[in-house]
Amino acid sequence: MILGSSRERRGLRLGQEYSRCLVREHVHEVILTKETGGPGSVIDRVAYLGFVRIENSGVVLVGDHVLWRGRALGRIAGFDGTHAPNHLNLVVTCTDECGDGISLGARLLDPIVFSQAGSNHED
């Protein structure tokens, strides 16, 4: 599902966790921000990209790269469990362009890849 909204005063408190396991077939929400943050910080300005279905289970760490359509979208700032156990919010600090899914032209089935910082998938 592609989302098309943003908030200026979300007050999204990132959890203290530095890692989360993403399980195959689970669905999670991707939230974008220009704010820098990390575990325990509060993020106010957010834009909602959409929901993703995990194809391959794995561990995602704060600072990991997020690639969208083969280009750098940003890095994992942290995780929010407000909607757990339904889904996690994966909060991404944008590298360049930041907006909601509709304004960025997101499409269903657009590939999103989580890549460990320092791996050969950074570019």
Image: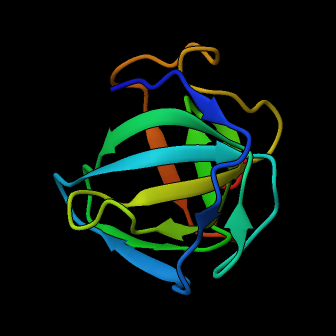
What residue is drawn where x is 36% and y is 38%? Answer: 51
What residue is drawn where x is 63% and y is 50%? Answer: 10
Q: Residue 68 appears at what percent x and percent y? A: 56, 35
Q: Quadrant of residue 12?
A: bottom right
Q: Quadrant of residue 6?
A: top right
Q: Please state if 26 lies on the left or on the right of 40 as rendered.
A: left
- Classify 2 as above or below 74: above
Q: Nearer the viewer, residue 34 or 8?
A: 8
Q: Residue 43 appears at what percent x and percent y? A: 70, 60
The image's colour scheme reads: rainbow
Q: Does residue 65 appear anywhere in the picture? A: yes
What residue is drawn where x is 76% and y is 69%? Answer: 37
Q: Split into 4 quadrants, where in the image is the N terminus? A: top left
Q: Residue 78 appears at what percent x and percent y? A: 59, 69
Q: Does residue 121 appear anywhere in the picture? A: no
Q: Residue 30 appears at what percent x and percent y? A: 48, 45
What residue is drawn where x is 47% and y is 41%? Answer: 112
